[in-house]
């Protein structure tokens, strides 16, 4: 896909729903009594994979689009799911005979959340797998924690990695301890089980807690479904038993992570009157990536809360001459910030990037590889820091590789503002989180 932007950057963009909120709400609602309606669920691959796993746990067979009979959800689910579920396009996702086979493709959140959900789905056996890359993403921390609570989980391949074989059962454990320095998704997966455990859950966290806003986001969704959980000091969370209950619909917010690419467009545009409206976005959101509005203020972008959303405009102030940030709480916007700084010539030092090595690709290596095409050579230090001194060779890249990583495609797309005609290879990877990204970008492009 070749990209050339118009000289004026003006418009409005309907962002996708938050997949972080969608996936949490799906898991929690599947454990709730009664179920409630979920409004505005994300339609991306990651959420489809999570819905697939929830359907399997509930005993509903997933149906591909175009099949004639998509059975109703288990009794009482009402219209929790608005349409039939399409499995990730890797292999048939659910088989008729036990163990029930679930393939979540490249959806890391679904792999972790579903592993926890299936572990408490009594009387059923599952085999959960994913893409080739997924089978190289570690999951032992979560598996060992679930085993400590009584879960029956075995590795079906390499020790410590998916695929997994899970025999669902009633978990009777109450206390578990795990490292908080690898992925907050392990923590969230365990927390969401807490209310349905007979005696609740006491979760003790070791080390520095990364992505704390995602943990608090989980707790806020749990609370919205009637659960009670409290922090005890800085490193222990206690979740009360009692289950989940919610009768009124639960609405999914727009996604702040997706908003970051539109911030980048405004930052890189030469249009002094650049203006993009993002309806439905709320600066008071619990999503940790809303900090993007603070970070991009330093890169020349103003955020204004409107009655129906957010408006992005130029501040008229030159970007900072150096940007230093700890992104341990917002790792998903690291690529956006790194690429924006590189295109603006702003030297940077970003820390807290330890999880980027185990994402859809090794994001630190991918950033180095692709930025080098622009003559920018950032340095990785201690596997969790990325630095650049601002020096660059003059280069005209022809194309950007995306490494099966949605965020690589979207973070580099705005570079075409500085390099017209830039080609993004394998652009369809955006379906993982933002299926409509290219359609949303089209009004801003020259397509002659």
Image (spheres, rainbow, N blue to C red):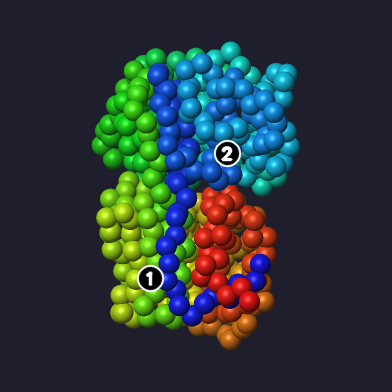
146 with respect to 203 (left or right): right
The picture quadrant where one finds residue 293 is: bottom left
Above or below residue 251? Residue 342 is below
| Sooner in the amino-acid sequence: mark 2 or mark 1 | 2
Measured as percent of width and height from the top left, residue 38 is found at: 43, 33
Measured as percent of width and height from the top left, residue 382 is found at: 50, 60
Above or below residue 114? Residue 276 is below
Measured as percent of width and height from the top left, residue 186 is found at: 48, 37
- Closest to the camera, between mark 2 and mark 1, is 1
Q: Residue at x 31, y 25 (%)?
A: 226
Q: Quadrant of the N terminus?
A: bottom right
The picture quadrant where one finds residue 158 is: top right
Question: Is residue 160 in sight in this rendering?
Answer: no
Measured as percent of width and height from the top left, residue 153 is found at: 60, 24
At numbered mark 1, what does the secondary structure look like: helix, strand or loop? strand
Q: Residues within 10 Å of mark 1 (few under 14, many from 20)?
A: many
Above or below residue 149? Residue 83 is below
For the image, the number of numbered tags is: 2
Q: Nearer the viewer, residue 442 or 234?
A: 442
Q: Residue furthest bottom?
A: 394
Q: Nearer the viewer, residue 118 or 429?
A: 429
Above or below residue 144? Residue 197 is above
Q: Residue at x 51, y 26 (%)?
A: 117
- Residue located beneath label 2 in the image: 48
- Residue located beneath label 1 in the image: 275
Q: Residue at x 49, y 80 (%)?
A: 7
Q: Quadrant of the C terminus?
A: bottom right
Q: Residues within 10 Å of mark 2 (few under 14, many from 20)?
A: many
The picture quadrant where one finds residue 46 is: top right
Q: Residue at x 52, y 77 (%)?
A: 6
Looking at the rendered structure, which numbered label has been put on residue 254?
Answer: none
Q: Nearer the viewer, residue 338 or 172?
A: 338
């Amino acid at each position: 896909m070749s990209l050339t932007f118009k000289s004026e950057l003006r418009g409005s963009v309907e962002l996708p729903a938050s997949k972080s909120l969608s996936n949490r709400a799906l898991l929690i609602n599947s454990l709730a009594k009664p179920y409630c309606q979920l409004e505005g669920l994300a339609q991306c691959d990651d959420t489809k994979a999570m819905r697939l796993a929830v359907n399997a746990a509930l005993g509903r067979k997933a149906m591909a689009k175009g099949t004639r009979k998509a059975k109703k959800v288990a009794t009482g689910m009402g219209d929790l799911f608005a349409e039939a579920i399409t499995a990730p396009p890797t292999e048939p996702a659910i088989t008729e005979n036990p163990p029930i086979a679930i393939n979540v493709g490249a959806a890391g959140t679904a792999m972790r959340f579903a592993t926890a959900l299936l572990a408490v789905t009594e009387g059923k056996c599952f085999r959960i797998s994913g893409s080739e890359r997924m089978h190289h993403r570690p999951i032992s921390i979560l598996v060992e924690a679930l085993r400590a609570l009584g879960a029956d989980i075995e590795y079906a391949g390499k020790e410590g990695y998916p695929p997994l074989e899970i025999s669902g059962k009633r978990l009777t454990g109450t206390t578990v301890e795990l490292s908080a320095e690898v992925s907050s998704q392990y923590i969230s997966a365990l927390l969401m089980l807490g209310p349905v455990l007979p005696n609740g859950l006491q979760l003790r966290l070791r080390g520095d807690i990364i992505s704390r806003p995602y943990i608090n986001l989980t707790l806020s969704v749990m609370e919205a479904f009637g659960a009670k959980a409290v922090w005890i000091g800085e490193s222990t969370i206690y979740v009360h038993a009692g289950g989940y209950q919610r009768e009124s619909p639960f609405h999914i917010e727009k996604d702040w992570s997706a908003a970051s690419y539109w911030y980048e467009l405004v930052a890189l545009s030469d249009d002094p009157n650049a203006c993009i409206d993002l309806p439905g976005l709320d600066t008071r959101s619990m999503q940790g990536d809303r900090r993007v509005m603070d970070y991009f203020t330093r890169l020349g972008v103003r955020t204004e809360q409107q009655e129906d959303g957010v408006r992005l405009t130029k501040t008229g102030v030159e970007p900072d001459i150096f940007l230093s940030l700890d992104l341990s709480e917002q790792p998903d916007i690291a690529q956006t910030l790194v690429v924006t700084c590189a295109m603006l010539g702003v030297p940077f030092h970003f820390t807290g990037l330890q999880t980027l090595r185990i994402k859809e690709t090794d994001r630190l290596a991918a950033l180095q590889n692709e930025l080098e095409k622009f003559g920018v050579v950032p340095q990785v230090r201690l596997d969790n820091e990325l630095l650049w001194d601002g020096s660059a060779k003059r280069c005209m890249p022809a194309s950007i590789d995306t490494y099966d990583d949605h965020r690589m495609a979207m973070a580099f797309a705005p570079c075409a503002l500085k390099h017209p005609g830039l080609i993004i290879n394998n652009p369809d990877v955006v379906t993982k989180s933002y299926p409509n990204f290219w359609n949303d970008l089209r009004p801003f492009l020259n397509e002659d």
